[in-house]
Structure formats: structure tokens, C-alpha cells
Image: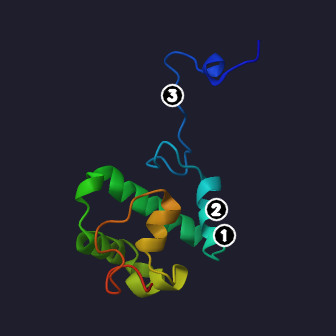
Amino acid sequence: MAATTQDFVRPGFEPVPDPDFPHAPIDWSRAVGEQAAREMGLRMTEAHWQVICALQEYYAQHEEGHINVRELHDALDEHFHPEGGIKYLYQLFPGGPIAQGCHIAGLTPPAGAADKGFGSVV
């Protein structure tokens, strides 16, 4: 008899989060993010991963269905102010730090993220 997926599930087992991304969605990994970035033509650097981590942390602290795009935009601008704020983020994510960043981070972009003023130039 062939093994099934159920044969490998242990009671009480929970996936161990990546220590670099402690707030990542359960079904997300750096490899998943890397693949999404490649599909968008982005080559991920440590600076990109810092933004992804910040997005995941923000979502972990807020209820995903109630993310306010303006508040997220302002939080990212403030968090990355020493590097240049939102202008710096657009250099990393030319398609928009919120729209592209959320997609790579395995997060659902908030309503309005496709607005050119908040996170997307698409």
C-alpha cells in the first residue's frame, strides 16, 4: 500500500517558522517569495527582504481584512525613513511597495493598493 499525505502528519505538529520571517503566513516561504519576485522581474536583495518582513509584521499586528492602505503606506514611509522613505521603497519595488511587496510576502494587498498614490504604478 502506498504512503499517503496523512501518513506523514504527526499529531500536534506545527510548522516551524523561518526565524528571519517570524510573522510570515503559514503557507509562505522565502522560496515562494523568491519565485513571485522572479515572475515580476525583481532580483531580491537583503533590502527587499527587510520590506517583506516589515509587511508581514504589520499584517500580523492588524486584522488582515481591515488593513487601511493609507495607514500601511504611512507606516512603511516612517519605518524606512532613514533610507529615504517611500521613494526608497519605490526604487526597490517599481510596481509599488504595497502591491508588489504584499504579493511577494504572501499577503492580500489592501483595498486601494492598486491606486497609484498608495502602492502600485500598474
Are dots 2 and 3 in contact, CB under 8 Å? no
Quadrant, the N terminus? top right
| Mark 2 → mark 3, Cα distance in angstroms | 23 Å
Q: Is residue 45 visible to the viewer in this orientation of the structure? A: no
Are dots 3 and 1 in contact, CB under 8 Å? no
The amino acid beneath tag 3 is Glu
Q: Which residue is mark 2?
A: 34
Residue at x 51% of width, y 51% of height? 21
| Mark 3 → mark 1, Cα distance in angstroms | 29 Å
Residue at x 47% of width, y 49% of height? 24
Q: Earlier in the sequence, mark 2 or mark 3?
A: 3
Name the quadrant containing residue 79. bottom left
The numbered disc on residue 52 is none
Q: Is residue 86 visible to the viewer in this orientation of the structure? A: yes
The percent position of residue 14, horizontal first and vertical second, equals 51, 28
Are dots 1 and 2 in contact, CB under 8 Å? yes
Q: Residues within 10 Å of mark 1 (few under 14, many from 20)?
A: few
The amino acid beneath tag 1 is Arg
Whether residue 31 sits left or right of residue 120 in the image: it is right
| Mark 1 → mark 2, Cα distance in angstroms | 6 Å
Quadrant, the C terminus? bottom left
The numbered disc on residue 14 is 3
Above or below residue 30? Residue 42 is below
Whether residue 4 sits left or right of residue 61 in the image: it is right
Q: Which residue is mark 1?
A: 38
